Image (cartoon, rainbow, N blue to C red):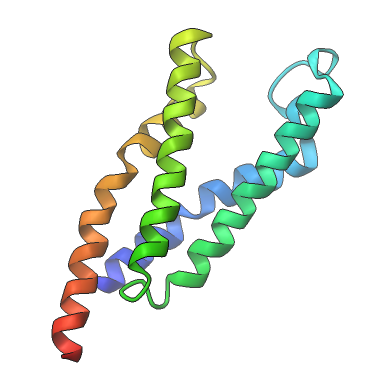
Amino acid sequence: MKRGLQIFLAIFSLAPLYFGVTGVFFGAAGHMPADAVTPDLDSQFRYLSGLYIGFTALIWWFIPNIDRHVWLFRLLTLAIFLGGLARLFSYLTVGAPAPQLVAGIGIEIALPLIIIWQTAVARKAQLENG
């Protein structure tokens, strides 16, 4: 159960890493016409892309001991979930983004379900360690 969660998180973490790295290097112009990108928008986009890289680093840090980092895992999951809610708000008020971003909304909104898995892993480790 623990190994499966670790593998899942390692694979899942490749998405924010990809979007973070490409966002830092290509900025907002990687997603829209370059003439529509303002310096403020590009700066904000690259900043948030850096946060994705930071999230990935946190995920990689707690993967080996996922059974011991319950609150950090929940906090990071909450942050990602809130980002998904913000994207959903944008979808409903501004319009549909690119299909891969719509898929991201679904993943971010559903991510708290993984807390159930992580809680089971943590409880099992507690029972085994007494």
Q: Could you say which quadrant of the image residue 49 lies in?
A: top right
User: Which is nearer the eye, 82 or 107?
Assistant: 82
Location of the N terminus (image quadrant): bottom left
Give the x, y percent position of residue 2. Answer: 27, 72
User: Which is nearer the eye, 99 or 42?
Assistant: 42
Residue at 46 percent of width and 45 percent of height: 79
Location of the C terminus (image quadrant): bottom left
Left or right: where does residue 67 sit relative to residue 99? left
Position above or below: 121 against 48: below
Position above or below: 120 against 100: below
Residue at 33 percent of width and 44 percent of height: 111
Residue at 80 percent of width and 33 percent of height: 43
Residue at 76 percent of width and 24 percent of height: 41
Count numbered badges in the picture: 0
Left or right: where does residue 31 sit relative to residue 118? right
Give the x, y percent position of residue 18. Answer: 61, 47
Residue lying farthest top? Answer: 94
Position above or below: 100 against 49: above
Give the x, y percent position of residue 82. Answer: 43, 36
Left or right: where does residue 85 sit relative to residue 39? left
Give the x, y percent position of residue 125. Answer: 21, 80
Q: Could you say which quadrant of the image residue 4 lies in?
A: bottom left
Q: Could you say which quadrant of the image residue 7 lies in?
A: bottom left
Left or right: where does residue 54 sit relative to residue 28? left
